[in-house]
Each structure stands twice: as C-alpha cells, then as structure tokens.
Amino acid sequence: MNPARTPGRALLLDADRYLNAYFDQEAAQLTAGP
C-alpha cells in the first residue's frame, strides 16, 4: 500500500514522527525520576 505523496500527508507523517519522539523522550524523563 503506497498512498500518494502529497505535501499535506508528508507534513502529517513528519508531525506524527516528531510527536512520537517527543513523548517517548518525556516518558523516559518521567520514569527516570526528577
């Protein structure tokens, strides 16, 4: 399955990837403690 590479879709995928990385980092800091 290869969806059309539209600028909007690429932007959404980049944002999704960025948010996933951001929340993973936040979770790691929370589990590590203060």
Image: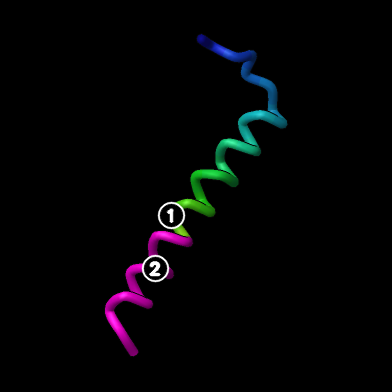
Examine the rendered structure and indicate whether residue 29 appears above or below residue 7. below
Which residue is under mark 2? 27
Q: Position of residue 17 (x, y in %)?
A: 49, 45
**Residue at (34, 90) in percent of width and height:** 34
Which residue is under mark 1? 21
Q: Amino acid at mark 2?
A: Ala
Query: Residue 5: which quarter of the image?
Result: top right
Examine the rendered structure and indicate whether residue 29 appears above or below residue 1. below
**Residue at (47, 51) in percent of width and height:** 20
Query: Residue 4: which quarter of the image?
Result: top right
Q: Residues within 10 Å of mark 2 (few under 14, many from 20)?
A: few
Q: Is residue 27 magenta?
A: yes
Which element type, helix, strand or loop, lies under badge 1?
Answer: helix
Q: Position of residue 12 (x, y in %)?
A: 64, 38
CB under 8 Å between discs 2 and 1: no
Q: Amino acid at mark 1?
A: Ala
**Residue at (56, 44) in percent of width and height:** 16
- The mark lying in front, picked from 2 and 1, is 2
Which element type, helix, strand or loop, lies under badge 2?
Answer: helix
Over which residues does the magenta segment extend? Answer: 23-34
23 on left or right of 8: left
